[in-house]
Amino acid sequence: MYRLSRHFAYAAVIGLGIIPATVARAEDEDRNDFVQTNLVSDIPGLATITDRELVNPWGVSHSPISPFWVSNQATSTSTLYSVTDETNVSKVNLTVAIPKTAQGPQGPTGQVNNANTSSFLVNNGGDGGSALFIFANLNGTISAWDTGPTAFIQVTTPGAVYTGLAINGPQTRLTPPMAREAAASTSSTAHSPR
């Protein structure tokens, strides 16, 4: 009995010595796994690129072949950035204006990329082509873009404050969560609320 207890005590001491060493090694490895690199900021000197349009960014999206699109709520724009090799970033020479309305809070929040060429046609000022990027706005509008420097309002929901945007798998429905409505609404391929 004494011999078993002594072996158990040795095993426990060895085990307790290994656990902290393993945890310490895992903590060291975790510290080396991530390195923060500030790519873009509106604050001079904080990142690789200073962009005065990038103020209160919300949504980010991209297509498989496009740069990253960022919704800038405070400037009512979307700016585009090309990122390569994890930390090399460049600003694309296109800033898309997101339309404002006469009342309420303003600016884009969520956005999605739409690759379905038969859904979400850009009318109301657009050329009727399929929207490539769609924006939800704090002013209760859904805006769409397919070309040029401006997105166009496709639908307005009075009193709504959209705080994001989701698109379904077949890219035929939008769901913008609302801060000022009881539930999220859903828009079909024609941008009309459901």
Image (spheres, rainbow, N blue to C red):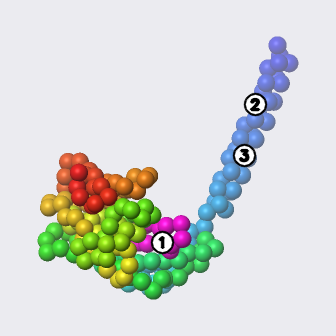
Displayed quadrant of residue 76 = bottom left
Q: Which residues are magenta?
A: 58-73
Name the one closer to the observer, 31 or 160. Answer: 160
Residue 1 is left or right of residue 84, and the answer is right
Q: For the residue labelled by badge 2, is the local secondary structure a helix, a strand or a loop?
A: helix
**Outermost residue to the top:** 1
The vertical placement of 108 against 52, above or below, is: above
Residue found at x 72% / y 46%: 22
| Secondary structure category for the residue under label 1 | strand
Say what amino acid the circle numbered 3 marks.
Thr
Residue for point 35% across, 83% down: 149
Q: CA distance from mark 2 to mark 1?
A: 53 Å
The spot of residue 137 in percent (x, y) is: 27, 66
Viewer can see residue 177: no
Report the residue marked by disc 1.
Answer: 68
- At 40% from the left and 52% from the top, the residue drawn is 168
State the image quarter where residue 94 is shown. bottom left
Question: What residue is pinned by disc 2?
Answer: 12
Q: Earlier in the sequence, mark 3 or mark 1?
A: 3
Between circles 2 and 1, the one closer to the viewer is: 1
Viewer-proximal residue among 97 and 16: 97
Q: In the picture shown, does residue 141 fall above or below 10?
A: below
Quote the CA–CA distance across marks 2 and 3: 15 Å
Kind of residue at disc 2: Ala
**Which residue is denoted by mark 3 in the rendering?**
22
Contact flag, marks 2 and 1 (Cβ < 8 Å):
no
